[in-house]
Image: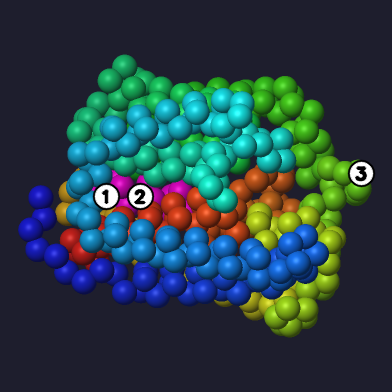
Amino acid sequence: MPLKKSTPDFILIIVTMTLLAIGLIMVYSASAVWADYKFNDSFFFAKRQLLFAGLGFAAMFLMMSIDYWSWRKWAKPILIICFILLLVVLIPGIGMERNGSRSWIGVGAFSVQPSEFIKLALIAFLAKFLSEKQRYITTVKKGLAPSLSLVFLAFGLIMLQPDLGTGTVMVGTCFVMLFIAGARIFHFAILGLAGLAGFVGLILSAPYRMARITSFLDPWQDPLNSGFQIIQSLYAIGPGGLFGLGLGESRQKFFYLPEPQTDFIFAILSEELGFIGGSLVILLFALLLWRGIKIALGAPDLYGSFLAVGIISMIAIQVMINIGVVTGLMPVTGITLPFLSYGGSSLTIMLMAVGVLLNISRYARV
C-alpha cells in the first residue's frame, strides 16, 4: 500500500475543467431556443447543467481525497446496491420512461440513471477481482466465467430498460480490462463471435434498432423518421466548415435537430466552432486519455492500474461512440458525450471517475 501522497495530476485537472467549461457554454448555446420555447427560460438547461457540474465538481474533489484502495474494500456492497437500483428502475410507477426507455428514478425535481452508476461500480469490482485473480485470467472456470457472469447480468438488466448504448459502453470497458489483464485472444475470439450473434439478435428483435441500422447505411432512405437525426446532424457539421458559423449562430438548433443539448451536442459545436473547434475538443479528449494511460502505467499496485484502465476505457469508448454516431460513422444510439452533453447522472459519474483517477495519480509515478 502506498504511503506517501504527491500532488494530483495537474494536466488532467486542467483538461477536465476545460472540457467542463466548453460543455457548459455549448449546453446553453445548443438549448437556449428549445428551452425558451418549452419553459419560457432560455437558461433552463444551462442552469441545471451548472448545478450538475457543481455537484460533480464537489464529487470529483471528494473522490480525489479518498484513497483509491477504499474502493477495493467497498466494491462489492456498492455493486450490490447498483444491481438493486437496476431492478428498482424496472418497476412501473418508480422507473421513469423517456423516449421508450425506463432508465430513470425520480428524485424530487431531478432524476437518477442507475445504469450510469453501475459502470463505475463494475469497474471497481472487476479491478478488485483481476488484481486478486489475475493468475487465473487465462482460464475460463476461475477467470473469465466469474467476471463475465456479472458483466452480462448487468448488461441483461440494462437491456430490459432498454439501453443498448450504455450497455455497450459497459461491456466494452470490461472487455478492455480483461484484455489488459492477460485474457487469451482465443477466448476473446469466441466471445466476439458469440457477442456478434447476440448483437444481431438484439437488433432483429426490435424494429427500431433495425431501423437505426438501415438509416445508418442510408439515412436518406427514410429522411423524416429513422434517418432524421443523422441527416440533421450532418447538416449541422457540414456548414460549419473550418471556423464555424460563430458561437450561438447554429441554425440546426432551431427545432431541426431534436434536443441538441444531449447526445448530438458535438454537431452543434462543430456547426458553431467548425473543424477547428471540433478538433480542439477531440485533442482535449486525447490528452485526457494520455494522462489516464500514464497514471495506469505508473500506479503502485495492480488494483490501481486496473481501476485506472477501466475508468479511462469507459471515457474513451463513450467518446468514440458518441462522435462516431454524430458524424455518421456508427448507427444512432443514446450515448452522451462526456463532460459536454446535458445530463446529471452522466456528468456526475464522469467527474467522480476523474476524481478516482486523480487520487491514483497522487501515488503514481507519472
Cα separation, mark 1 vs mark 2, equals: 6 Å
Cα separation, mark 3 vs mark 2, equals: 40 Å
Q: Quadrant of the C terminus?
A: bottom left
User: Which amino acid, by three-letter code, is at mark 2?
Assistant: Val
- In the rendered image, residue 138, in percent from the top left (x then y), is placed at 31, 27
Q: What is the secondary structure assignment of the residue under circle 3?
A: helix
Judge the density around disc 3: few (<14), some (14-19), many (≥20) Cα neighbours within 10 Å. Answer: some
Relative to residue 220, is residue 267 drawn left or right? left
Residue 38 appears in which quarter of the rendering? bottom right
Judge the density around disc 1: few (<14), some (14-19), many (≥20) Cα neighbours within 10 Å. Answer: many
Instruction: Give the residue at mark 3.
Output: 221
Instruction: Give the residue at mark 2.
Output: 309
Q: Which residues are magenta?
A: 304-315
Kindly report the secondary structure that dominates the magenta region of the rendered protein: helix
Instruction: Give the residue at mark 1.
Output: 305
Residues at discs 1 and 2 in contact (Cβ within 8 Å): yes
User: Which amino acid, by three-letter code, is at mark 3?
Assistant: Gln
- In the rendered image, residue 238, in percent from the top left (x then y), is placed at 80, 69
> Is residue 197 placed above or below 119 in the rendered structure?
above
Relative to residue 262, is residue 366 drawn left or right? left
Q: What is the secondary structure assignment of the residue under circle 1?
A: helix
Between residues 325 and 20, which one lies in front from this camera angle? Answer: 20
Residue 162 appears in which quarter of the rendering? top right
User: Which amino acid, by three-letter code, is at mark 1?
Assistant: Ser
Q: Earlier in the sequence, mark 3 or mark 1?
A: 3
Between residues 124 and 141, which one lies in front from this camera angle? Answer: 124
Residue at the (71%, 28%) spot, across then down: 203
